[in-house]
Image (spheres, grey):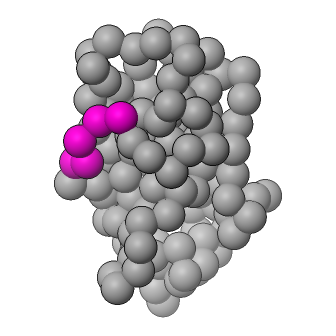
Amino acid sequence: QVQPVESGGGLVQPGGSLRLSCVVSGRTFSSYAIGWFRQAPGKERESVAAISWNGGSTYYADSVKGRFTISRDSAKNTVYLQMNSLKPEDTAVYYCNAKPKIYADSALAAWGQGTQVTVSS
């Protein structure tokens, strides 16, 4: 089974950018997708973006469309989330995980520790 490990979070000012990385270990399937999720304190985990394993399809939440870009480097088994024009409301712990479909809320692997993204002046 796949085991994603995310990194790249940090502290950034509003309007700044960050690039998150998700290294996917283990067996993968062409029908799977890799998604980015985030969870702010006191809020439910929400789906932010996803990409099919073959890279043919992408999904973005309305709140991040035009600002975030998900991409995949198959040679490195890595999925990236480029985050531009960051806003304070983007502050959250970001997780990556395999999903059965790009629009699914469910995850196929156990949740890791995530990577903290803090957007503040």
Expressed as whole percent of the image width and height from the top left, the position of residue 78 reads 43, 26
In the rendered image, residue 30, in percent from the top left (x then y), is placed at: 54, 12
Q: Nearer the viewer, residue 38 or 91?
A: 38
Instruction: Give the side of residue 47 with respect to residue 103, left or right.
Output: left
Q: Residue at x 75, y 59 (%)?
A: 65
Residue 32 image position (x, y, % from top left): 51, 23
Q: Is residue 59 above or below residue 38?
A: above
Residue under the point 58% across and 33% down: 101
Q: Name above or below for residue 1 compared with residue 47.
A: above
Q: Which residue is outermost to the right?
A: 66
Magenta region: 108-112
Q: Residue at x 28, y 54 (%)?
A: 114
Residue 99, position in %: x, y?
47, 35
Residue that appears at 48% across and 89% down: 121
- Of 51 and 117, which appears nearest the observer? 51
Please identify the quarter of the rendering in which residue 1 is found: top left
- In the rendered image, is residue 89 in sight? yes
